[in-house]
Image: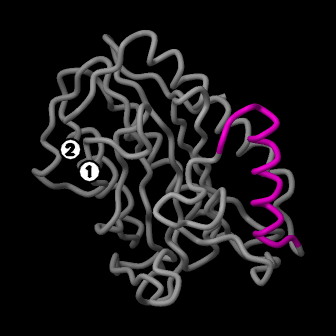
Amino acid sequence: MIIIKTEQQIKGIRQSCQLAAQTLKYLSSFIKPGITTRSLDDLASEFIKKHRATAAPLNYRHYPKSICTSVNDVVCHGIPSDKVILKNGDIVNVDITTILNGYYGDVSATYPVGQISQKTQDFINHTREALNLSIQSLSPGETLNSCVGQVIQPYVEKFGYSVVRDLGGHGTGLSFHEDPFVFHFNTPKNDILLKPGMIFTIEPMINASPDWRVTVDPVDHWTVRTRDGSLSCQFEHTVLITATGSEVLTKL
């Protein structure tokens, strides 16, 4: 069931989304060669606690850390670790979800580590633009598929990339994950009418090859990687459908 949020709920969700975005911005200044993903997790945890909020991922279905840090071929749900040291040429997605006064805010972005190739920078730019184009098309009366899957998939495929199909965005705000599930490729499963008061994430996971297939780590049961070892990139915003269009709640 898709929950249409009240004005009071929207206000609370907006505040949590702003905190998530502030946390992400704070962490971005620490992303450089030599830092461990565990250090990023510690910094995020301290920042979120300082603002009287909690990190939604911590202990969610036994997830052991406060944020997700997904490096290179890791699509999502990378677990921060002392053993993962960022090096020059890497890319890393940092995914933040906060709970503030009972409301959830969810955001992520992919960052270069040190100097990266122009090809990799283009990949990051194109993934970010795919999200932006989708958000720009959102409007009440349109369908979720026409504004997300039908926008993102053709855009990224013209560069030889692919859209991960096993994972997607989701409703959020009152719970971590709510209806609807948001597919980022063209599918009639997302022929859902957009209405004012709907809040959900758009978070395309794009692989830098035509192969969209992924694998889940058999040991930690969380880390998702590209099957062919290609890079993967993701950007995410939490958005609100308004009477005239949309509002990006996680935009600072």
Q: Main secondary structure of the magenta part?
A: helix
Left/right placement of residue 224 relative to residue 51 reads left
Q: Position of residue 62 (x, y in %)?
A: 52, 67
**Between 59 and 202, the one nearer to me in the picture:** 59
SS assignment at label 1: helix
The answer to if 50 sits in the magenta stretch is: yes
> Which quadrant, please, contains the C terminus?
top right
Q: Residue at x 15, y 30 (%)?
A: 193
Q: CA distance from mark 2 to mark 1?
A: 5 Å
Taking the spot 44% from the left edge, 18% from the top edge, the residue there is 9
**Label 2 environment density (alpha carbons within 10 Å; few <14, some 14–19, many ≥20):** many
Q: Amino acid at mark 1?
A: Gly
**Residue matched to label 1:** 149
Q: Secondary structure at mark 2?
A: helix
Image position, residue 21 (x, y; %)? 66, 37
Residues drawn in magenta: 35-54
As shown in the figure, which amino acid type bears the numbered disc 2? Answer: Asn
In this rendered view, identify the residue nearer to me: 118 or 37: 37
Query: Which residue is at 37% across, 30% downward?
Result: 199
Please tell me the numbered disc located at residue 145: 2
Q: Is residue 166 above or below residue 107?
A: below
In depth, the one of 19 and 65 nearer the eye is 65
Residue 207 lies, in percent from the top left, at 44, 72
Q: Do residues under tags 2 and 1 come within 8 Å of each other at their CB atoms?
A: yes
